Image (cartoon, rainbow, N blue to C red):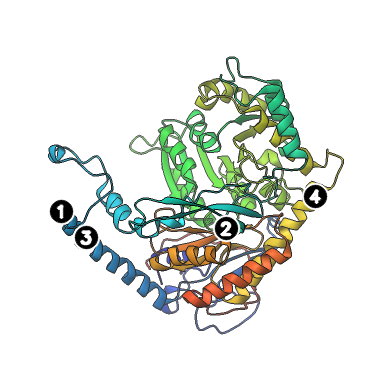
């Protein structure tokens, strides 16, 4: 198995590493993981799907918690490494030809007179870009010339120099089924109440504000939006920012600094990673969604304190996401909150993908688990997904929000949110709350949940390896091999289906995938059409890697044993 799948196994997602003195089976995995509920002989640690249920100690879970991370087939892993090895060899050969002016190189590189300088470009990243990424560059940055709804229009483009440059043909690919946008509740549309309200706001306030919130850019609509967001989240106050990425990267440095400790999930978004680095705090990473790993770091931090001085940490901040956008997994929030309370730490929750998309009321992961918002110290989310707009928010206690207004760079230096964008968020949020006098929001939340479960179950039946939680609208389908990244995207587009394919550096180099995002605006006919095409392309490219097309989940108890590092 691959290194990354080994990490997932260690995280308790597919099968567990040897812990608590158990004797491992072949490959170092415990085969009797489910013995407390039923005895079954297994040739491997499959099935890789589990049910996390409430237990007697504290009743942390009130509903089944099902996540799937199937192990990479050994033969597929071998061929994937071989594929990257062959591409690397040919890449060095082509660099040799470029050096002798036999092949033309179009990408940025050091000038002849700067050869003695420290390189401006990272060597491996530059090598990867010109020799691997360029081969499949046509799979990304496709220009959309319509609303990114359930269907969209794409501008056709061609390349005559192996994706170094593109030329537009003037043709438009009409009615492409959109399985890539984060339009979870379908509010990214050019008709209906949201579009009409945003248009009216544009005529009244214009598009730009041309100032920061602290100067002349604080509109009454911003105040109304912040009060609405606070009510939607169930917190005392909130603050909105015009850019989702900056909501993390500019606010975390205002919350922690030197002498503070940040405990970050290993799969956290780049904006969280950047914010943690800019803060100057000490950063320690725990295994993805692994509560034993997190507890070990918390215990060590309290016992040993800061390096060298061993003084207590000023703050310990746990940083997690609601839905992880590349894995489709949902944070084990009840367990995180239990650990946070036990060790007196703070919790920062990023709900960029989960707000609006999870829970019976669309309230995100807290609503999904039925938890109290007061148990989360800093609630963050974005309006770019479920609300069909732009920007982000921070929610929490009033004294926290007042502090951030004065100290956050996103509040002091960033231009205020555009008025029509603010109105789009207000209208869509009121739809979700039911304050518009209709059931549009409630119906869309229900339809999204139905579409998510249907699409996931059908992909699993077809034979694909899919990652993540059963209730997550982010659905990764594993492709693994580098040549199949571009081939999958191209073949799907030929059949009028638009998808997002993802590879290194957004994922581990061996875990390339196609990522589907389901929307409430998708009809069952659209999903059936897409599934038929996906199955056809899967057969063509031979990417139906799953060893079991149907696998009823086994029940397993909450693992409250100590975390132990073991060798693979």
Q: Which residue is mark 2?
A: 328
Mark sitting earlier along the chain (4/1): 1
Q: Nearer the viewer, mark 4 or mark 3?
A: 3
Label 4: which residue? 442
Between discs 2 and 1, the one toward the N terminus: 1
Q: Secondary structure at mark 1?
A: helix
Kindly identify which residue carries mark 1. 99
Q: Nearer the viewer, residue 379 or 26?
A: 379
Residue at the (60%, 76%) spot, across then down? 462
- Which dot, 2 or 1, sits closer to the camera? 1
Q: Nearer the viewer, residue 168 or 187?
A: 168
Residue 151: x %, y % from top left? 65, 55
- Relative to 138, does residue 317 appear above or below in the rendering? above
Question: Residue 94 — which label?
Answer: 3
Q: Position of residue 17 (x, y in %)?
A: 46, 68
Q: Earlier in the sequence, mark 4 or mark 3?
A: 3
> How far is disc 4 from disc 1 in space, using C-alphas?
61 Å
Q: Is residue 282 above or below residue 82?
A: above
Q: Is residue 280 above or below residue 326?
A: above
Residue found farthest to the right: 437
Residue count near mark 4 (Cα–Cα under 10 Å), binned few <14, some 14–19, many ≥20: some
Q: Relative to 435, is 195 on the left or the right?
A: left
Residue 55 is at least partly visible in this image: no
Which secondary structure, mark 2? loop
Label 1: how many Cα within 10 Å (few below 14, some 14–19, many 20+): few
Q: Nearer the viewer, mark 2 or mark 3?
A: 3
């Amino acid at each position: 198995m691959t290194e990354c799948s080994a990490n997932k196994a260690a995280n308790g997602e597919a099968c567990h590493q040897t812990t608590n003195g158990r004797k491992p089976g072949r490959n170092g995995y415990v085969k009797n993981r489910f013995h407390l509920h039923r005895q079954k002989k297994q040739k491997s640690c499959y099935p890789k799907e589990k049910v996390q249920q409430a237990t007697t100690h504290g009743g942390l879970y009130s509903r089944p918690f099902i996540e799937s991370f199937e192990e990479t087939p050994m033969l597929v892993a071998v061929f994937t490494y071989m594929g990257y090895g062959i591409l690397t060899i040919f890449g060095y050969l082509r660099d040799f030809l470029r050096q002798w002016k036999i092949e033309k190189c179009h990408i940025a590189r050091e000038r002849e007179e700067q050869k003695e300088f420290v390189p401006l470009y990272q060597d491996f990243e530059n090598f990867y870009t010109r020799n691997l990424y360029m081969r499949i560059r046509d799979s990304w940055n496709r220009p959309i010339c319509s609303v990114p709804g359930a269907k969209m229009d794409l501008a056709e483009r061609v390349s005559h120099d192996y994706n170094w440059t593109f030329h537009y043909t003037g043709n438009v690919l009409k009615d492409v089924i959109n399985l890539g946008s984060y339009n979870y509740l379908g509010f990214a549309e050019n008709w209906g109440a949201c579009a009409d309200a945003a248009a009216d706001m544009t005529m009244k306030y214009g598009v730009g504000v041309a100032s920061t919130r602290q100067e002349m850019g604080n509109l009454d609509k911003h105040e109304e939006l912040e009060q609405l967001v606070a009510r939607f989240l169930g917190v005392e106050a909130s603050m909105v920012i015009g850019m989702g990425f900056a909501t993390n990267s500019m606010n975390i440095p205002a919350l922690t600094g030197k002498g503070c400790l940040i405990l970050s999930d290993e799969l956290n978004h780049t904006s969280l990673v950047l914010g943690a680095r800019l803060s100057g705090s000490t950063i320690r990473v725990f295994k993805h969604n692994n509560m034993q790993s997190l507890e070990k770091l918390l215990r060590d931090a309290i016992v040993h304190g800061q390096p060298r001085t061993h003084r207590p940490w000023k703050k310990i901040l746990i940083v997690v996401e609601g839905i992880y956008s590349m894995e489709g997994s949902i944070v084990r929030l009840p367990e995180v909150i239990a650990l946070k309370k036990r060790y007196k730490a703070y919790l920062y929750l990023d709900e960029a993908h989960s707000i609006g998309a999870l829970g019976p009321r669309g309230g995100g992961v807290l609503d999904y688990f039925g938890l109290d918002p007061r148990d989360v110290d800093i609630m963050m989310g974005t309006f770019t997904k479920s609300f069909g707009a732009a920007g982000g928010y921070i929610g929490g206690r009033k004294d926290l929000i007042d502090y951030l207004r004065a100290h956050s760079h996103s509040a002091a230096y960033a231009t205020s949110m555009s008025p029509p964008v603010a109105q789009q968020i207000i209208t869509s949020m009121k739809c979700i709350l039911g304050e518009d006098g209709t059931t549009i929001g409630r119906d869309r939340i229900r339809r999204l949940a139905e579409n998510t479960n249907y699409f996931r179950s059908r992909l699993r039946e077809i034979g694909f390896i899919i990652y993540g939680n059963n209730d997550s609208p982010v659905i990764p389908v594993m492709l693994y091999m580098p040549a199949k990244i571009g081939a999958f995207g191209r073949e799907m587009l030929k059949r009028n289906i638009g998808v997002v394919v993802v590879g290194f550096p957004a994922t581990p180099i061996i875990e390339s995938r196609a990522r589907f995002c389901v929307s409430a605006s998708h009809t069952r006919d659209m999903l059936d059409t897409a599934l038929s095409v996906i199955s056809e392309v899967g057969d063509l490219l031979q990417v139906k890697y799953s060893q079991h097309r149907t696998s009823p989940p086994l029940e397993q108890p909450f693992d409250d044993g100590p975390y132990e590092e073991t060798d693979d």
